[in-house]
Each structure stands twice: as C-alpha cells, then as structure tokens.
Image (tube, rainbow, N blue to C red):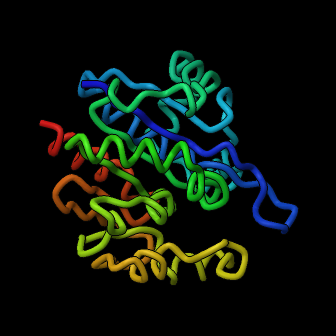
C-alpha cells in the first residue's frame, strides 16, 4: 500500500503579514494511521524540502498525541524535512493521495496545475482521493468526466462558522464550504471543531483538524 501525502509550500496568510502553512495535527495524525497500518508513505510539496508548519497549529492548546509522537520521532521529522517536489511525483506509483489542510493550500495547491493533474490521474485510475479541513480546497478546479469532481457527492471541509471563529473569513481567497456547494457538492457538516468525515465512493473528506485521524482511517477502509 503506497500512500502519497501532499503538503503546502505556502507560508504567508494572504496580505496580513502573518505566517501560515500546514496544520501539524492534520499531517501527524494521518501519517501515523498510515504508518501503523504498514503503508509506504511519500510526502510531497510544490517546492520540496521542509514545508512550513502553521505556528498556530503548534500552540500549547493544540497539542495532540500524534503531534507528541511526531516530536519524538526523528525518522518522521526527516521525512517531513525532505519532501519530494510535487512535479517529480507520478500518480501511477501510488494507491491514493491524502491532502492535509492548514490555510496554506488555499493559496498554492488549490490552483496548482501539477496538483490538479495528479488528483485527476489518481481518481481517473479508480483510486481514492482524501483531504481534510482546508485540504478539500485543492479540489476546486479538479474535474472528473467533464464535471467538478465534487458535483453530486457528499463532501465536507472547514465550515464557514469555523473560518469565522478564527477570524479569517475576509482573508482566505474563498470559503471552503461555499466553494464546495457552488461546485455542486452535497456539503455536510457537524458542529464546529467536532470530528466529521464524509465518504462518497472514492472521495473522502474531513471537516477540521479533529477529523484528521478519522479521515485517514476511512481512507484505509476504502483502500482495503
């Protein structure tokens, strides 16, 4: 079982002058779900190398078991520090792709032609695609059989109310919830910050950081 994880290389939160990146829990939790299942994991990003961790995700109040495990795991840290360049990745080499969130992907991966082509190639080959939190933003230009990949499918992602709670509604290029609905997705959600995952065929989406483990576990079920 070969799993590709794709992280953002973007580290600026719009024009706020504040840093962003990927959300550490959304990488760490799925990484260990996959690793403990015996998967071979490759981590990629547009620029390669060490992707930017959103500093907010590592604040004391946001610590999780998976993050603690990651901080005591030199091997995983080495993997993260040396992500492969997205353009060097071949869809044929993997059984699936998983996109963690954080706000970073809203600016680079959402419109990255290489990422879009990768998702389309994996999905067209009959393989599953998964994304969590702001990760589903990467689907907004992805097509399947001439239609948006999310059209008519049950999907979730970071909610408008969660974006409002972190006071970034007017900073992000678009709202994940609104965009998934605009594209014809059957958007569903739970309460703010609750774990919630949708599975519709080969498309798996998680609502927020708390959904990271569950999204990874659901992906494994689809793969099996």
Q: Which residue shows up at 34% across the image and 21% down it?
A: 40
- Total marks drawn? 0
Q: Is residue 97 left or right of residue 95?
A: right
In-front residue for pair 112/7: 112
In-front residue for pair 121/192: 121
| Extreme residue in the left direction | 224
Residue 109: give x, y in percent of width and height.
58, 51
- Decide: is 66 above or below 138: above
Residue 198: give x, y in percent of width and height.
25, 64
- Decide: is 210 above or below 33: below
Does residue 80 appear in this view? yes
Q: Is residue 85 left or right of residue 132?
A: right
Residue 43: give x, y in percent of width and height.
50, 30
| Extreme residue in the front direction | 146
Q: Which residue shows up at 68% across the image and 75% down it?
A: 168
Q: Which residue shows up at 27% across the image and 60% down it?
A: 145
| Extreme residue in the right direction | 17
When asked about the image quadrant of residue 104, the answer is: bottom right
Quadrant of the rendering where the N terminus is positioned: top left
Q: Is residue 215 left or right of residue 116?
A: left
In-front residue for pair 150/212: 150
Residue 224: give x, y in percent of width and height.
12, 36
Q: Which residue shows up at 60% across the image and 82% down it?
A: 164
- Decide: is 143 above or below 181: above
Does residue 72 appear in this view? no
């Amino acid at each position: 079982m070969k799993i590709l994880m794709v992280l953002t290389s973007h580290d600026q939160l719009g024009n706020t002058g504040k840093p962003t990146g990927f959300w550490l829990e959304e990488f760490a939790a799925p990484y260990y779900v996959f690793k403990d299942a015996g998967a071979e994991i490759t981590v990629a990003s547009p620029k390669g190398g060490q992707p930017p961790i959103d500093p907010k995700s590592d604040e004391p109040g946001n610590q999780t078991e998976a993050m603690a495990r990651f901080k005591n795991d030199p091997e995983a840290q080495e993997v993260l520090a040396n992500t492969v360049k997205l353009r060097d990745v071949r869809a044929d080499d993997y059984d699936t792709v998983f996109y963690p969130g954080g706000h970073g992907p809203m600016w680079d991966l959402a419109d990255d032609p290489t990422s879009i082509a990768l998702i389309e190639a994996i999905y067209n080959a009959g393989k599953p695609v998964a994304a969590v939190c702001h990760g589903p933003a990467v689907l907004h230009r992805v097509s399947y059989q001439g239609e948006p990949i999310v059209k008519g499918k049950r999907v979730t992602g970071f909610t408008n109310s969660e974006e409002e709670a972190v006071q970034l509604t007017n900073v992000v290029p678009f709202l994940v919830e609104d965009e998934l609905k605009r594209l014809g997705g059957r958007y569903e959600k739970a309460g703010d910050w609750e774990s919630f995952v949708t599975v519709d065929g080969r498309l798996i989406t998680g609502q927020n950081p708390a959904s990271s483990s569950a999204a990874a576990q659901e992906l494994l079920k689809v793969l099996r």
